[in-house]
Image (cartoon, helix red, strand yellow):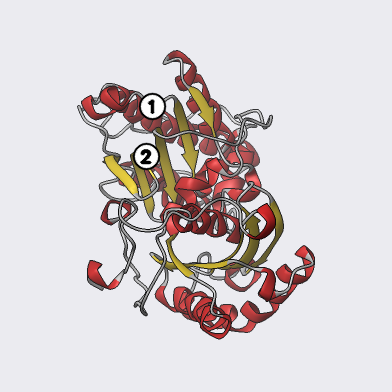
Amino acid sequence: MSDDKLIRLDMGKNVYHEHNVDGGRPILCLGIESSCDETSAAIVDSDRNILAHIIYSQIPEHQKYGGVVPELAARAHILAIDEVVRQTLDKANKKISDIDVIAATAGPGLIGGVLVGWMAATGIAQSTGKPLVAVNHLEGHALVPRLQATSASGSDEDSSVDFPYLLMLASGGHCQILLVRNVGEYELIGQTLDDSAGEAFDKVAKMLGLGYPGGPIVDKCAKLGNPTAFEFPRPLCDKPGCDFSFSGIKTAARTFLAKIPAPYSEKVINDFCASFQASVVDCIINRLNHAMHDDRVLTAQPKTLVVAGGVAKNSAIRSAMEQLAGRYNMQFAAPPMSLCTDNGAMIAWAGLENYKLGKVLTKPIAPRPRWPLTEL
């Protein structure tokens, strides 16, 4: 889809929507997310309150396959979407007439699933006359720390993470370092050249027979293991720049395991996970350290280092990034665990952030399986 099909109002020449509407009450946004294997909806207000948040997870449907099957995911979204939206409205004790704006993921993601959520949102908006915001799924992850944030230890932080901030975004097949200047203003500092961190975690978990989703299981096992038991590579850590490469770590994992007879002992699994995770964390911190010295980052002077996306749930990554932030006198912020994976609350919040700048649709669009943040 060409960029001109995404009709967005110029924030400098068009109306700015105030934070409050009738009688000074906050703006209410219904957000819908269906880009992968979670069908989710949420109602969030412009005062940063999550009034209701429902997630239907498809993990049981995909577990036996060791990963998400797109066709099964799309069918599950179709079966779940109406009930998820209904339960969200009921939980918030709201009617659709109470909602001020509708937002939904319009990409990137598995296009079958994206279409389900987008068509549901479009139908609601057209039948009620509510404004509709097309949300980039990655922007949902990028902005959700401004809705709610915690430290690595889990303590609450001030939710108002201010622009600009430096973001480590690791979600699904994406792994990027971004300078977040404002809503819709993202500058790419570094990205993976092959696998993402999340893919590496899931593939290693699959090699070990740990189940799906693998990332949380690897993190749990790593806490019980020796991080120096296996010597994993640290790709690109001796190179300038901020790009990542995780395929070499995955290859090393397969090579190591080919030499160890299965089934693997608990000690081998824990040591293997700890060593693998340590290599991933070292790569992330190395690249972020380089980013701190990038001219664009030095000029922008971000005050906060943020991690977002599914990999943001990893305890070792959160802890290492918080320590790095401290070395540069920066604050560290991450979404609470419940908002790291795909969810409707992040879409509702991104919808509100865009709506307040007048970025609403004025004609139909085609959802996109690929939609880089830098195209915003």
**Separation of marks 2 and 1 at Cα, in angstroms:** 9 Å
Q: Is residue 34 above or below residue 120?
A: above
Mark toward the start of the polypeptide (2 vs 1): 2
152 or 211, which is in the foreground?
152
Q: Position of residue 251 (x, y in %)?
A: 34, 46
As helix, strand or loop, the secondary structure at mark 1 comes to loop
Give the image quarter of residue 124.
bottom right
Q: Position of residue 213 (x, y in %)?
A: 57, 56
What is the crowding at mark 2: few (fewer than 14 residues within 10 Å), some, or many (at least 20)?
many
Q: Is residue 76 above or below residue 308?
A: below
Amino acid identity at mark 2: Val
Q: Position of residue 240 (x, y in %)?
A: 20, 27
On-image quarter of the C terminus: bottom left
Q: Is residue 315 above or below residue 37?
A: above
Give the image quarter of residue 97.
bottom right
On-image quarter of the N terminus: bottom left
Amino acid identity at mark 1: Pro
Asked if residue 25 can be seen in this view, the reply is: no
10 or 71, which is in the foreground?
10
Q: Are marks 2 and 1 in contact (CB under 8 Å)?
A: yes
As helix, strand or loop, the secondary structure at mark 2 comes to strand
216 or 231, which is in the foreground?
216
241 or 195, which is in the foreground?
241
- Determine the residue positioned at 63% across, 83% down: 79
- Determine the residue positioned at 32% across, 65% down: 370
- Determine the residue positioned at 63% across, 47% down: 48
Q: Position of residue 46 (x, y in %)?
A: 60, 51
- Name the residue carrying label 1: 302
Give the image quarter of residue 223.
top right
- Name the residue carrying label 2: 180
